[in-house]
Image (cartoon, helix red, strand yellow):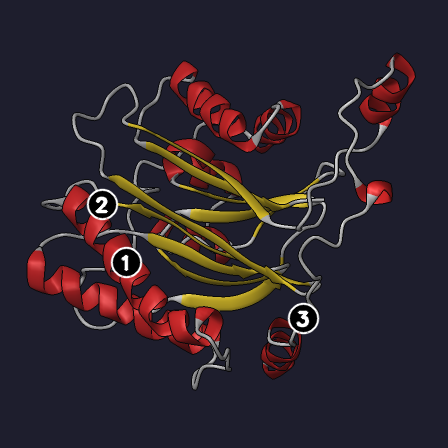
Amino acid sequence: MNNIFRSLKNKFFKKKGTVPRGSLNAATEVSTAPLTEAELGKLAQKKLQIEPQQLIYGVGRNIGCIREVNEDSIFSFTAIIDSNGSSMPFGIYMVADGMGGHQHGELASEIAIRALSSYLLDQLNEPFFGPEPFAPEESLQEILRLGVQYANDHILRSVPEGGTTLTAVILIGTQMTLAHVGDSRAYAVFLDGRIQQLTRDHSLVKRLEELGQITAEEASNHPQKSMLYNALGQGGSPRPDIFTAILPHPGFLMLCSDGLWGVVSEDDIFSIITSAPNLQRACQNMVDAAISAGGPDNISVVLARLSD
């Protein structure tokens, strides 16, 4: 982290040379002549490259076909500082799924993302976006841990009987730091066809599967597969899984609620993502696929990648 900030400070704040006004000559004047067919053909064949390199994202959210209330909440924040040859793509993304069977699950999920996003932006604003960038006193993992506790405290005060999952990520270039509570998921999607689940479900049925007491097939069809042992708003302190990983590049990061991953297969998810013209369309197509499969739950998805 310190190297990141030293690099930012050294590169972002070098004095730039200036060009005197009126110094353009005939050799630098821009031509507005139409391009020839040959020139247009070369442009069409050239690989699309986005400059500066930046985070591209899409989101999707739907109530589904059965629920009367949408208890999912999502958050996305994308920024970039690009200056003097140095670029820092930055993003914060979250999915929260209010727990069915608890009062005001939709309020719990909304409070979770509002509280955590507010905390993160407050803690990271000056270090990353201030006039003199510096390394925060705590690591990103510790900031996320404190932010999850902050969100949990707000839920306990505002909706003491509410509960929610929360999966959140801070993305800086290809480095992603994740915090996870519950059974919403984060996936790394690689272009070679691999989909890697990054998070571990905090459900009782998943725990039985991990202990070898039931099979994966039995877990997927278990009537209590949505019962969680770790969530926000359940009293005491949540126990988030917090870790740092590398964003697939080329590839995608996907956050989603169980209304998507519990209904649409990983093979179909990969096919939808890689065949869509853009990430927003990919998210909408995944939502549509979950609805076509019956839409038994609320559906939320966030998809992000680093530009080529």
Q: Report helix, strand or loop for mark 2.
A: loop
Question: Which amino acid, mark 1?
Answer: Ala
| Direction bottom: furthest residue | 137
Helix, strand or loop at label 1? It is: loop
- Whichever of callouts 3 and 2 sits on the residue coming sooner in the sequence is 3
Distance from the alpha carbon under mark 3 to that under mark 2: 53 Å
Left or right of 122, for residue 27:
right
Gap between marks 1 and 2, in whole Å? 9 Å
Q: Quadrant of residue 37?
A: top right
Location of mark 1 (residue): 231
If the image is split into quadrants, where does the N terminus sit? bottom right
Q: Amino acid at mark 3?
A: Lys
Indicate whether 19 appears above or below 77: below
User: Do residues under tags 1 and 2 come within 8 Å of each other at their CB atoms?
Assistant: yes
Residue 287 shown left or right of residue 176 in the figure: left
| Residue at mark 2 | 99
